[in-house]
Image (tube, rainbow, N blue to C red):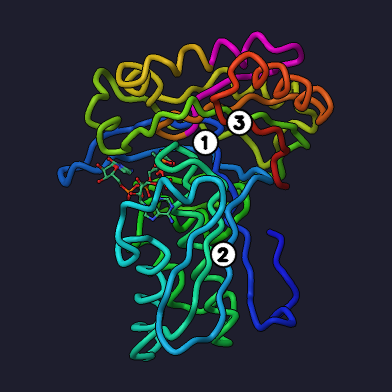
Amino acid sequence: MTVSSDPGTDGVITEEAPAKLNLYLHVLGRRPDGYHELDSLVAFADVADTIGVRPADGLSLTIDGPFASSLAAEPASGNLVTRAARLLAESVGRSDPAVAITLTKRLPVASGIGGGSADAAATLRALARLWGLGADHPSLGPLAARLGADIPVCLTGRSAYFGGIGDIVDPAPPLPSCAVVLVNPGIPLSTPAVFKARSGPFSTAARLSGDRAPTDAAGFAGLLASRHNDLTAPALSLVPEIGTVLEALSSAPGCLLARLSGSGATCFALFGDEATARAAAAKIKAAQPDWWVVPGKLSA
Ligand SMILES: C[C@@](CO)(OP(=O)(O)O)[C@H](O)COP(=O)(O)OP(=O)(O)OC[C@H]1O[C@@H](n2ccc(N)nc2=O)[C@H](O)[C@@H]1O
Ligand SMILES: Nc1ncnc2c1ncn2[C@@H]1O[C@H](COP(=O)(O)OP(=O)(O)O)[C@@H](O)[C@H]1O
């Protein structure tokens, strides 16, 4: 996780909020409360929103960046960033968060890469630094879980398995260096709607055996190929364009694996090196100028 010096000369503390990718996602069952039990290997890409915090008279949130307009219609009080700030302030006995927060929104909203969850986790980390609480303050984990199923894994920012409904986070073995391309067709997809559209039998858990992942991207993609994302069929039923995105990624030269992330509609493909990923991204963007197409790499 990249962080700025602590704090910057302008008094702002920044934290990156990277895109989460579900390298595989198996749905194991449905609990009586409607939540689903999951088994997923989660990794992060070097494509991120940025959170900045600085002391102020009261709590405020300013959103900029290419996807700021996607959040313009929602009240700032409902944003996961301000909810995270209020909850952390309450839990450490601060009556008011008294911080000005800036969110630079580069990740598409409601797109299966956990941008909102990453923003909330980055806010918790930034405020823990601003308030001198320490990165392992005992309030952070429980607060993350209260804010959303994906947020505990985003708090660590490292590749991990998640189990339970996303609240059980276990370290994953070191992943090989992999280049990626992320593609979103510009259609938001609601996570509850996708879970609701899921049908059919449940899967079994499929963690990689042993404590090692292959050391090369091709071997790793081969292991992932025998796993899947169980939300692909319901997501496709709601947004058929996902099929076009997966085809564009799969047919790109050098693509090792193309898959939907989370509940979609963002898809990713793995490549052995960054030059090949950049070439694939340029070709897809030229054919589909309205899509969000970003090359990058998986973080360690
Ligand atoms: C599906 C995943 C996979 O990583 O990612 P996204 O597609 O959202 O990025 C996550 O589990 C999403 O986590 P998150 O987006 O935090 O979900 P939450 O806000 O807690 O839940 C939103 C809704 O999704 C459904 N939900 C979520 C998680 C889960 N394990 N089972 C569910 O059934 C429930 O209907 C819930 O009300
Ligand atoms: N900071 C935020 N960024 C994105 N979405 C947010 C944020 N705060 C609240 N939300 C809400 O969370 C929903 C899910 O957003 P997001 O995390 O981008 O999607 P996903 O869970 O599919 O990866 C959005 O539709 C929006 O209403």
Observer-side mark, 1 or 2, equals 2
In the image, is the residue at mark 1 within 8 Å of ligand 1 by its beta carbon? yes
Residue segment shown in magenta: 246-261
The first of marks 3 and 1 along the sequence is 1
Q: What residue does disc 3 label?
A: 182
Mark 2 secondary-structure assignment: strand
Mark 2, Cα crowd under 10 Å, few <14 / some 14-19 / many 20+, is many
Q: What residue does disc 1 label?
A: 22
Observer-side mark, 3 or 1, equals 3
Mark 1, Cα crowd under 10 Å, few <14 / some 14-19 / many 20+, is many
Q: What residue does disc 2 label?
A: 51
Amino acid carrying label 1: it is: Asn
Left or right, 47 with respect to 166, comes to: right
Residue under the image location 63 percent in, 75 percent down:
13
The quadrant in which residue 7 appears is bottom right
Amino acid carrying label 3: it is: Leu
